[in-house]
Amino acid sequence: MTIIKHELNQRKIPLIIWTVALSFFLMVCIFIFPEMKSQMGDLNDMFASMGSFSSAFGMDQLNFGTLVGYYAIECGNVLGLGGAFFAALYGASALSKEEKEKTAEFLLTHPVSRKRIITEKLMALLMQITVMNVIVYALSICSMAVIGEEIPFKEVTLLHLSYYILQLELAAICFGISVFSKKGSAGTGIGIAVIAYFLNIIANIAEVVEFLKYITPFGYCDGANIVNNGCIDGVILAIGIAMSICGIIFAYLKYTKKDIS
Amino acid sequence: MQIIKTEKLTKYYGKARGIVDLDLEINRGEFFGFIGPNGAGKSTTIRTLLGLISPTSGSAQILGMDIIKDKISILERVGYLPSETTFYSGMKVKDVLKLSADMRKQDCSEQADLLCKRLQLDVNKKVDELSFGNKKKVAIVCALQHKPELLILDEPTSGLDPLMQKEFFDILHEHNKQGATIFLSSHVLSEVQRNCTRATIIREGKIIACDSVENLSKTNAKRVSINGNVNFNLLDGIRDKKISSNSASFLYSGDINHLVKTLADSHITDLTITDPDMDEIFLHYYQKEGDEA
């Protein structure tokens, strides 16, 4: 528990900043919905008929004039990308920052096994991502209640759940990759998040590369699929969970034997 | 009982040499010096013993336990003071000390208070605000607050002022008298000479001498200082020669009779022959045949 507490303390400020930022942007999106809705008659047709651009963001399959359709697209952009950055950055730096900031020597010369360090760091990572997502979810629901719209609980919950799993997957993969790094992996984390995001956009645009959905965690966060089918794609989710487990197992295998310079 | 025992301990970083076939035996209660210049393999040895890096071959035991299999049990009973200390940014000194104690699952507050008072360390300051010397003090308290059986110190006095160095060594001697073994890695030879009972000298990853400090100090070499003119070409075995206008000083490890005869035939006004100090001995061990320091 000591390392969990320590990690939570060390990451307190970034967690607050990311939570406030994501909640704020989502709340703004929700609060402007009534105004958007009143002008949506023409806009909806326009959004749905922009070809590849519409497909890229699932706007050809979602009704921008309904709260659930609007939220699925906005949530994808704000929580999807923002949450992915937060999770990837945190996951990528959890282990490597000890070497980058030269605190690894202090940490590893205490009677704490490297397995325990990895486990407690992962627990702290899980707790922080969970706390952020619970707060963002709660504030989003409250905001929907404030604007007086009927809340599509099932769809909103599934959307948030999928982005929560996405963040955990990205964090786990970046956690595994960060074991290789000695100088911090902020760039790697951001890079992976951006690549994953754009792979999904490309997969949405062209059928020939639709298989990319199975590689990127954004594949099972597809708002159009979730809203229209009322569930998260199980196959893509299973692939994502398998990749997360691989990242974590890899971190254990590599870090327990790594030479700390 | 041997507190540290290494057998042919070897570490290569890829093709680069770290330490080679290191055989080391340190007994319980010793104040042991580990001497060598930068890059000789001192830190590699320490980092291998502490499990930060894995040995390429060979084995080592600390407190009778294997450094790989029993690493955690070893670290519970060892205190380590690194040469450069870095703590988590934003933390106060007292939080760092508590974190260190918590990771050992011990309440070390009493001993920590005592050490902080002796080292004049303000526990309410943030570690980022501390000077290098004060950070070192925090590391000293972290290394000592759980009263370890073995203390591994890597260049411990860098950054400490002379008064603090004295206080630090007083604390170490008190721990040593209470039974703690001290492993002091340093290139400040005078502190090894003053404090250690036994020492080993490492060069290019290999141990080149290991004996009591007293015996290590007894070399054939003598420090000769003269006023006057001497023809140095007649003397073999001269090292570390320093010549000024009418005086000279050098380490002499040749035939002492030949030295006396040569000096007798020269015009000198003053002569001093003394045993060399530890620094000079160190140079003696480090000098390759035919080299001059």
Image: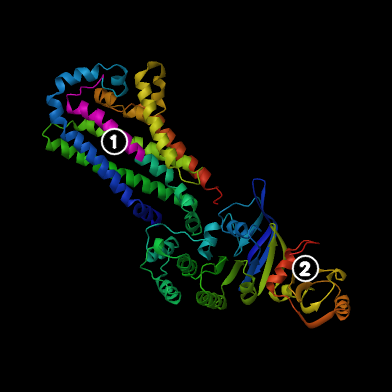
- Is B92 on the left-hand or right-hand side of A249? left
Which residue is painted at 20% across and 22% down in the image?
Answer: A63
Quarter of the figure with residue B26: bottom right
- Whether callout 1 and callout 2 share a subunit is answered no
Q: Examine the rendered structure and indicate whether residue B272 appears above or below residue B25.
A: below
Which of these two is toward me, B30 or A19?
A19
Q: Which residue is mark 2?
A: B239
Q: Examine the rendered structure and indicate whether residue A160 appears above or below residue B32.
A: above
Subunit ID for the residue under disc 2: B
Amino acid type indicated by mark 1: Leu
Residue B210: x percent and y percent?
71, 68
Disc 1 from disc 2: Cα separation? 72 Å
Q: Which residue is mark 1?
A: A79
* Dominant secondary structure of the residues highlighted in magenta in the image: helix
Residue A160: x percent and y percent?
27, 35
Subunit ID for the residue under disc 1: A
Query: SS of the residue at dot 2?
Result: strand
The residue lying furthest to the front in this view is B245
Q: Which residues are magenta?
A: A60-85
Magenta-drawn stretch contains B80? no
Amino acid type indicated by mark 2: Arg
